[in-house]
Amino acid sequence: MTLLDILPSLRSVVTPRLDPAVWPADTHYDDRGRVTVGTSALEDVADRNGTPTVALCDVELQRRVDALRSLFPFARVNVPDAVLGVGDNSSWVVGQRLSVMVESADALATALTASVAARRITLHDTAAHVAEAADRFGADVHIGRVVLDSTDDLQPLLRASGRPVDVMLDVRTGEDADAVIAAVVASDHLRLTGVHWCPSARFDNDYGAAIGSMIATMAQIRYDHGVIATELGLGCADANLAAEIDDALDDACGRQRFPRPNISVDPGESLLAGSGIALFRIDFVEPITDGHTFVWVDGSPSDALTDHAVLVNRHPCGPQATATILARSGREIAGDVRLPLDVHAGEVLAIPLARA
């Protein structure tokens, strides 16, 4: 038994045992010994949302969004759809007037339900999800913009569009690009507004080469169709390359004699790195042998997870054992973490997402 067991009121004044280098900002133990982010106890988040789920730290997210806005002051920041549907994050997105990059019909429904302005929603995914959005929402759905990957997306999109829709061309479409451009330009209610790119094998992470190719494509669209595209979307934008991106834009636009377009940056899942905590409910605990145990949970392995874990419902007081966290499939989620000796099924584990 420790002093914290005898005098639980001391929990609020002792040094936190959650390493700030590992856990998101404002993660701490409350006076009941529960792991809390801000004012939200993770135990309550798990009960409310079910598990597995991810809790996000608004303080950390705000810091990252502010950093992007300072580096790209005139850009539209698109947060990933994973931010929606967790706690009060939908309200945070709306209050910050952030745009959302959605990648499924379910995420689109969440965004619309959360009152995200239609003009701030970008749908980027396969034709199947475009078609699903059409079937679920019909002509009433109003998406701010759609990123087209191929000509396969066109017919579902045309069926879904009861009103004009802005379209951005994914430059990774390769041989389909000319066909996509021609079909969009020929449509009565699709407007070709720009191009979009995410790092891929074609350019790897060479933003300079990618931006040069994108501006060249926009200049060719102007030459072939008389349409001036005004938007350039950068997926997985690296804030550390802001100056390089800015210089590449100036160089490419000058070379092509093309007006500098409006920019949108999509940090993707990297925005969540270091600001999220995965929550899993324990299914089964193997009896401890030689000071080691195996704990099965209802989640799945991910490279985004760290090898740190705590129980969300109580302070780690008393004797502990080394544990390996396993998915139901038997694959390892986290190894060699320290958990209370009496850990049992039904409790909820928290594992922080790795920092970028």
Image (cartoon, helix red, strand yellow):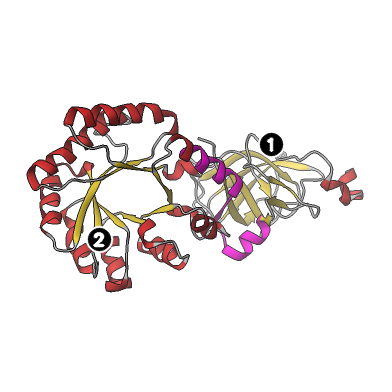
Disc 2 is placed on an element classified as strand
Q: Say if 228 sits above or below 260 in the image.
A: below
Between marks 1 and 2, how big is the CA–CA gap? 47 Å
Residue at 41% from the left image edge and 53% from the top image edge: 99
Residue position for label 1: 19
Indicate left or right for 183 with 26 as reference.
left
Q: Say if 96 sits above or below 164 in the image.
A: above
Image quadrant where residue 74 sits: top left
Q: Residues within 10 Å of mark 2 (few under 14, many from 20)?
A: many
User: How many labels were placed on the picture?
Assistant: 2
Instruction: State the image coordinates of residue 193 (x, y, percent, origin top left).
Output: 23, 50
Q: Is residue 57 magenta?
A: yes
Q: Say if 348 sits above or below 216 in the image.
A: below
Residue at the left extreme, as displayed: 224
Residue position for label 2: 165
Q: Residues within 10 Å of mark 1 (few under 14, many from 20)?
A: few
Q: Is residue 57 visible?
A: no
Q: Is residue 47 visible?
A: yes
Indicate left or right for 11 with 180 as reference.
right
Residue at 35% from the left image edge and 30% from the top image edge: 246
Q: Is residue 54 magenta?
A: yes
Q: Nearer the viewer, mark 1 or mark 2?
A: 2
Closer-to-camera residue (185/49): 185
